Image (cartoon, rainbow, N blue to C red):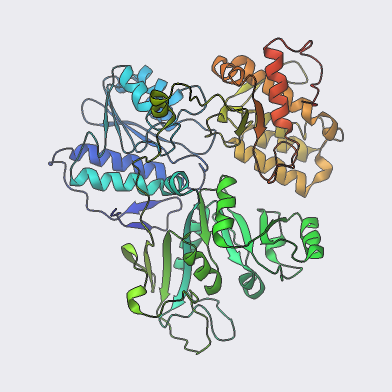
Amino acid sequence: MALSCLTLTANPSSVICKCKVSLPTAPHALDATYIRRAAHLADKSAGFTSPHPNFGCVIVSPSGKVSGEGYLYAQGTTAAEVQAVASAAELCRGATAYLNLEPSDCHGDHSAVSALLQGGVKRVVIGMRHPLQHLRGNAVRALRNQGLHVDLLGEDLTSNLIEDAQKECLLVNAPLICRASLRVPFSVLKYAMTLDGKIAATTGHASWISCKQSRNLVFELRGRSDAVIVGGNTVRRDNPRLTARHGGGHMPMRIVMTQTLDLPEEANLWDMSEVSTIVVTQRGARRSFQKLLASKGVEVVEFDILNPREVMEYFHDCGYLSILWECGGTLAASAISSGVIHKVYAFVAPKIIGGKNAPSPVGDLGMVEMSQALNLIDVCYEQVGPDMLISGFLQPLPDMVPVIPSLNETFVVDPTVSPYESRIIFFYKTWDPYGVLSNYSPHPIQMPDENGDCVTWMSVEHYYQAHKFIRVDDPLAQDCVERIKSAISPEEAARIGRSMQEQKPYLIRSDWDNIKIDVMYRALKCKFSIYPQLNSMLLSTAGSVLVEASPHDLFWGRGRDGEGLNYLGKLLMKLRSEFLGESSSSSETPSLTV
């Protein structure tokens, strides 16, 4: 699969595809132009929407003018289609909606499809089907069943311009495609080297090989990633911070991969005030040092066999979509050999440093002939200040054609197969088939405050995090409540609440450990009481065990090896029993002996 060239610019959250935009004279040229515009809009939220896709929507009125636009800012925020329809208002009647990706109404409310229908859109052009099997084709069928004309790029519409537009749709959601098809996050290897291929002097000194403009692009790359990974050598030699430094917003998780855990006791990565750090290591490595890291708030994950493939599969299960590798040559070679690196960004500075033993960006790959060299696909060249940025794919994006039948297709062959017949139902991210069970699902709830007045919270997680600080007589606590209440997404509300709890534990209400289960239960009960479709989903799980599958949360989730307490799953099962009339009282604090 040939992919168009993707170039980062100095404008944060901006990706421009360096393709020639032809005048709209060829067949479907206008469709291609507006789909590319939708893809550019979608890219504005890169790094914020994870684990959800990047969505953009453009409404074009019958007169041919853009009358509304929107993009999904973050998980739990208003759908791109809803924003675009609201912006277009009456000009939406009879209009065409251009979407870079098939809508994924995975929360049970079908808000995106409903917005297009209620807005009076007559035609919908979609850049690509949804890559996740349980969502693929659902919105297309729903729209066509309501009489809308739906065109899919590459299926209903074909031309060279359409192919270029479709490539942009693939690129803007490359991390999601990799996750769906390969079961590993989309991984980018980034390095800066001199003209003679060195990433540091013989002494190890490396500040600075690349120019300031190049370093700014690296900060942007970090801001577009779920996590940044380095090896132990990088921590010991450079003592990096690995922050995005773009003035707020998304900050990627920091991951250190080290087999021996031979790391310094003091390091910038152990400072958890801005963002968390995870250390992955061999099982049994330096137990005393693991305790030291834990005391600093650093999470340590042990592996029986530590290699990049195992580590990436683990972080796939954690819900990560994209990883930026900023490691040294040894770990880079191991990651490439393991087949987990998908794209390379190489910053080449016009400098020569020499040195027989000076390190290079990629260690030994076991190749002895040039015919064995790995060739990049869709190579791009861009001058950044005095540097040259060379980028390309080490492997093509997976084919979007499904090879495993979807649940609907399987049902035609075997009517006994159903997605709702599992004895154990796992849920974690809100994009899962049962994602509405998550406390992060974007369903506002209304709850009375201490004065009996009704207050609207954007999600259960907003309500839960804020109540850590409610009734605390301190201006900082009150300010934190307001910040959580206005947080634009559940993820952001959680970041604010957890960060404040870690940095200023004295602000947490004294009875929090005793009441937090009841706080969560009240919020969940409100959510499943006011949304009939969510209530139906919960009741459809009758007879099944519900498990919140977060590998990190040992209280609300199951933990990595199932050692967690799964309180969220237990609360939902208790609530389900209450709705089914199996509970004698709905007012008492739920028993968690399920």
Residue located 58% across and 57% down the image? 310
**Vertical side of 77 occupied by 13: above or below:** below
Query: Would you identify the image quadrant in which residue 547 lies?
Result: top right
**Vertical side of 581 occupied by 7: above or below:** below
Outermost residue toward the left in this view = 25
Is residue 399 left or right of 583 when viewed as pictured? left
Q: In which quarter of the image is the C terminus?
A: top right
Q: From where the camera sits, is residue 211 visible?
A: no
Query: Would you identify the image quadrant in which residue 290 lies?
Result: bottom right
Q: From where the camera sits, is residue 101 visible?
A: yes
The front one of 495 and 418 is 418
Across and down, in percent, residue 394 comes to: 39, 62
Residue located 60% across and 36% down the image? 428
Residue located 50% across and 90% down the image? 356
Is residue 59 left or right of 31 when viewed as pictured? right
**Vertical side of 18 occupied by 489: above or below:** above
Outermost residue toward the right in this view = 510
Across and down, in percent, residue 99 comes to: 34, 34
Q: How many marks?
A: 0
Across and down, in percent, residue 317 comes to: 58, 46
Across and down, in percent, residue 158 comes to: 19, 40
Query: Would you identify the image quadrant in which residue 156 lies?
Result: top left
Residue located 59% across and 59% down the image? 243
